[in-house]
Image (tube, rainbow, N blue to C red):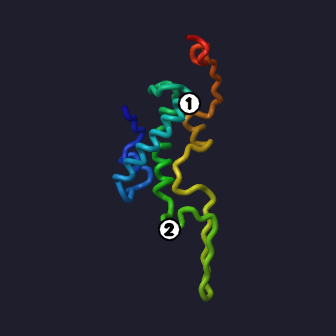
């Protein structure tokens, strides 16, 4: 079962019309999968209601992750600094964060309620000590 935390319509309400709706839909699915993976690391299998912060913020965070990817300038995707000049004019570009990359940073994890440390204890069977 695939869980999508946001739709293209949710994205449009927050960031306007995407250039390519098909790509936006795929990226929303990718973002949802990343969020599910992070959820599973902390709480196990996803079920609605297990974490109220996650349920409240999942749609907004999913759209935010996709917007990071869709907002990346195609021509200079990896630029950290760029300068050019001609005549009396000059231009420079500098990007301070990873553009075009989908990632769950500390702020996003905190927003989703996934910033807690997890303590796990394994039974002898889980450690492979029991037959």
Q: Nearer the viewer, residue 10 or 30?
A: 30
Outermost residue toward the bottom?
87
Q: Residue at x 38, y 59 (%)?
A: 19
Q: Earlier in the sequence, mark 1 or mark 2?
A: 1
SS under mark 1:
helix
Apparent side of residue 5 relative to residue 113 in the rendered image (left or right): left
Percent position (x, y) of residue 18?
39, 56
Residue beneath the point at 39% across and 51% down: 24
Q: Quadrant of the N terminus?
A: top left
* Residue drawn at 37 percent across, 44 percent down: 7
Q: Secondary structure at mark 2?
A: loop
Label drawn at residue 18: none
Looking at the picture, tell me which residue is in the foreground, 130 or 4: 130
| Residue at the extreme top of the image, as rendered | 131
| Residue 6: quadrant of the picture | top left
How many numbered marks are there?
Answer: 2
Q: In the image as oriented, which residue stretches furthest toward the left?
A: 22
Circle 1 residue: 41
Based on the displayed image, in which of its 4 quarters is residue 97 positioned? bottom right
Eyeballing the image, is 38 above or below 19?
Answer: above
In the shown orientation, is residue 127 left or right of residue 54?
right
Graded by Cα atoms within 10 Å as few (under 14), some (14 to 19) or many (20 or more), the crowding at tag 1 reads few
Foreground residue, 33 or 6? Answer: 33
Where 93 falls versus 29 (above or below)?
below
For the point 35% across and 53% down, which residue is it? 21
Q: Mark 1 and 2 residues: CB-CB less than 8 Å, in contact?
A: no
On screen, residue 40 above or below 111: above
Residue 101 percent across, percent down from the top left: 53, 52
Residue density around tag 2, few if under 14, some if 14–19, many if 20 or more, within 10 Å? few
On the image, numbered disc 2 is attached to which residue?
A: 75
Q: CA distance from mark 1 to mark 2?
A: 36 Å
| Location of the C terminus (image quadrant) | top right
């Amino acid at each position: 079962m695939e869980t999508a935390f946001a739709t293209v319509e949710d994205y449009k309400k927050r960031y306007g019309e995407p250039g390519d709706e098909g790509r936006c839909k795929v990226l929303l699915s990718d973002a949802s999968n990343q969020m599910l993976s992070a959820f599973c690391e902390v709480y196990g299998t996803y079920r609605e209601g297990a974490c109220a912060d996650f349920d409240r913020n999942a749609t907004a965070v999913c759209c935010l992750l996709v917007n990071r990817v869709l907002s990346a300038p195609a021509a200079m995707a990896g630029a950290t600094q760029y300068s050019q000049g001609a005549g009396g004019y000059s231009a420079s570009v500098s990007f301070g964060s990873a553009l075009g990359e989908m990632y769950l940073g500390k702020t996003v994890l905190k927003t989703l309620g996934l910033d807690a440390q997890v303590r796990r204890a394994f039974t002898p069977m889980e450690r492979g000590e029991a037959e």
